[in-house]
Image: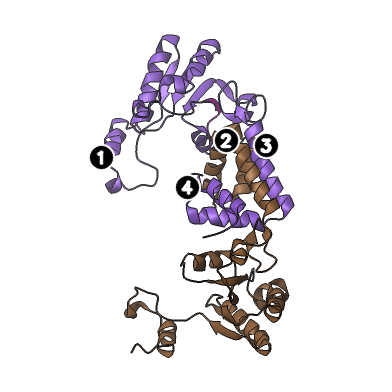
Chain colours: A purple, B brown
Amino acid sequence: MESAVSFEKLVEQFRRMPGIGSKTAMRMAFYVLSLSHEDAIELSETIREASEKIHRCPKCCNLTDEELCPICRHTARKQSLICVVENVEALMAIENTNEYKGVYHVLHGVISPLDDITPDDITVKELLSRVSEDGVEEVIMATGSNVEGELTAMYISKLLKPLGVKVSRLAYGLPVGSDLQYADSVTLMRAIEGRQTIT
Amino acid sequence: MESAVSFEKLVEQFRRMPGIGSKTAMRMAFYVLSLSHEDAIELSETIREASEKIHRCPKCCNLTDEELCPICRHTARKQSLICVVENVEALMAIENTNEYKGVYHVLHGVISPLDDITPDDITVKELLSRVSEDGVEEVIMATGSNVEGELTAMYISKLLKPLGVKVSRLAYGLPVGSDLQYADSVTLMRAIEGRQTIT
């Protein structure tokens, strides 16, 4: 198929994005061409700006375009409670509950020997120096419940122990609204182990 | 949820694209942030460039970044046979068959009274002046087989008739590889009407 070089280039750029197949990439490229020149420039500038301005918060490694991220700057948030998450998506998921009032630490990955990701590749060092300096009381390990998430949580917990802070882990159990018969046996076992007294 | 302003802006820009929901838009924005600064600039520049360079071919209204589109420039293509399509996607679909050796005319839409799209909003005028000037022998109406596509094909056919060119329409019938029992009755009726002698 012969089409404009700039068009092909655009489709290719979109196709590299996660979750975007070649048909969607093409639709996106046609969308760009359907935009007025001003709107296309705005899209282009937004990408450039995001890449230029957004950096890691020097405190919690969350992404921000200001000096400190909004969560670290927030005076009402409990700075002595740190929730350790794998990435910004996980941070956002917890923020969406509107329940957590502590701060975060974003690891930007998990330890994964198979993928050659060591503790040095994620922000473990930053977390340790933060915990030893600030008056941190509790660290919640909120990494995923898969092998890598567990490994990372265990590894960091061991390093945190000598620092004398309380380290906790998110609860395992049944997802709210789910039926017992559809739960896998490992989840069910963990739910029994972690049972809580109600009266 | 409090996150960086430039990030929110980026997600919003992606979310406007066709077929992109808010979760995919967010994944795309994270992808942009995961790029090196050079790669992000390249993406940004590709969008700007496509918007600046790509324009309609003055002959067939296909999108191109050169003076004439590659199909109109192609010396081996039969300039006297014009296939009229709704949009560039349809043109690409026909090109992908590798069978059609004529040229195209892209309408950039279909007549649709309900959506307030009149013949003046699509490139009907360009087609008419092209047919009356060039030595065109046949025009194939390859608009969709829905109401708007049919309407557009009928409308243009009537305008072309006085110009003395042959006007044809894509064949209706069973999709190749399909079973008779699953065909809808209108398609089946058209397939019977359009039956062809095989010996």
Which amino acid is tagged 1?
A: Ser
Chain containing mark 2: B
- Where's residue A175, x and y in %? 38, 42
Which quarter of the figure has residue B60?
A: bottom right
Q: Image check: A139 left or right of A116?
A: right
Q: Are marks 4 and 3 in contact (CB under 8 Å)?
A: no
Res A49 label: 3
Say which residue label 2 marks. B33
Which amino acid is tagged 3?
A: Glu
How many other residues sit within 10 Å of disc 1, few (<14), some (14-19) or many (≥20)? few
Secondary structure under tag 2 reads helix
Q: Are marks 2 and 3 in contact (CB under 8 Å)?
A: no
How many other residues sit within 10 Å of disc 3, few (<14), some (14-19) or many (≥20)? some
Specify the segment rendered in magenta: A100-104
Chain containing mark 3: A
Question: Which badge, 4 or 3, comes first in the chain's sequence?
Answer: 4
Chain containing mark 4: A
Q: Is residue B168 above or below residue B99?
A: below
Say which residue label 1 marks. A185
Question: Which badge, 3 or 1, comes first in the chain's sequence?
Answer: 3
> A121 or B177: nearer the eye?
B177
- Where's residue A161, x and y in %? 40, 13
Say which residue label 4 marks. A19
Which amino acid is tagged 4?
A: Gly
- Where's residue A22, x and y in %? 48, 53
